[in-house]
Amino acid sequence: MPVEIKGGINIAMKVPSHQYETVVAFYRDVVGLPPFDEKQPAKGFILGPNRLWIDEMPQLSQAEVWLELFTDNHERALTHLAAHGAVRCDAVEELGEGFRGGWVMNPANIVHLVREPDAW
């Protein structure tokens, strides 16, 4: 049975502290995206059908963009991705006990959360 993987709705922007407030202000005040604050301290913005999360990351020196992928079987999808060159990187952020997903990096070191959505 082939693995089904499709794009998720969440895009995370991990931003160093020295850029955080100006990046948030850019999306809020300049672009004018509607904000939401479901998962504070992250700042969220509605980005069309997607959700843009902006997280302050003091340990970073430059911003990173992280993407989300949905699958109906995260273990099979993570195995498939790893077999095709994706690097597992579960240490980048704790997902919590029982979370049905994991972290991988693509060949350009872009982090992806591969997860089973709450409602498939």
Image: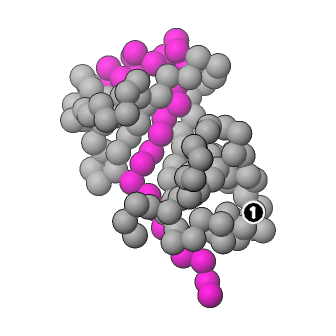
Task: Work out which residue is located at the far bottom of the displayed protein and give it.
Answer: 1
Residue at 44%, 61% (x, y): give it: 117
Q: Does the stretch in magenta take in 13?
A: yes
Q: Where are the magenta residues, as a range?
A: 1-26
Q: Could you say where residue 8 lies in the image, as x and y percent from the top left?
A: 44, 58
Residue at 42%, 48% (x, y): give it: 10
Q: Does the stretch in magenta take in 31?
A: no
Mark 1 crowd level (few <14, some 14–19, many ≥20, 10 Å Cα) = some
Q: Could you say where residue 15 lies in the image, as x and y percent from the top left?
A: 52, 25
Task: Work out which residue is located at the far front of the displayed protein and give it.
Answer: 97
Residue 35 visible in the current orientation? yes
Quarter the N terminus occupies: bottom right
- The residue lying toward the viewer, choosing from 92 and 67, is 92
- The residue lying toward the viewer, choosing from 116 and 29, is 116
Residue at 40%, 15% (x, y): give it: 21
Q: Could you say where residue 90 lies in the image, as x and y percent from the top left?
A: 69, 45
Instruction: Identify the residue under disc 1.
Output: 82
Q: Quadrant of residue 57?
A: top right
Quarter the C terminus occupies: bottom left
Which secondary structure, mark 1? Answer: helix
Q: Could you say where residue 12 lies in the image, as x and y percent from the top left?
A: 47, 39
Instruction: Give the answer, above or below, for where 23 lies relative to 110.
Output: above
Instruction: Give the answer, above or below, for where 118 lies relative to 59.
Output: below
Instruction: Give the answer, above or below, for where 104 lies relative to 52.
Output: below
- The residue lying toward the viewer, choosing from 38 and 82, is 38
At label 1, the amino acid type is Ala
Instruction: Give the answer, above or below, for where 48 lies relative to 27.
Output: below
Residue 111 located left or right of residue 23: right
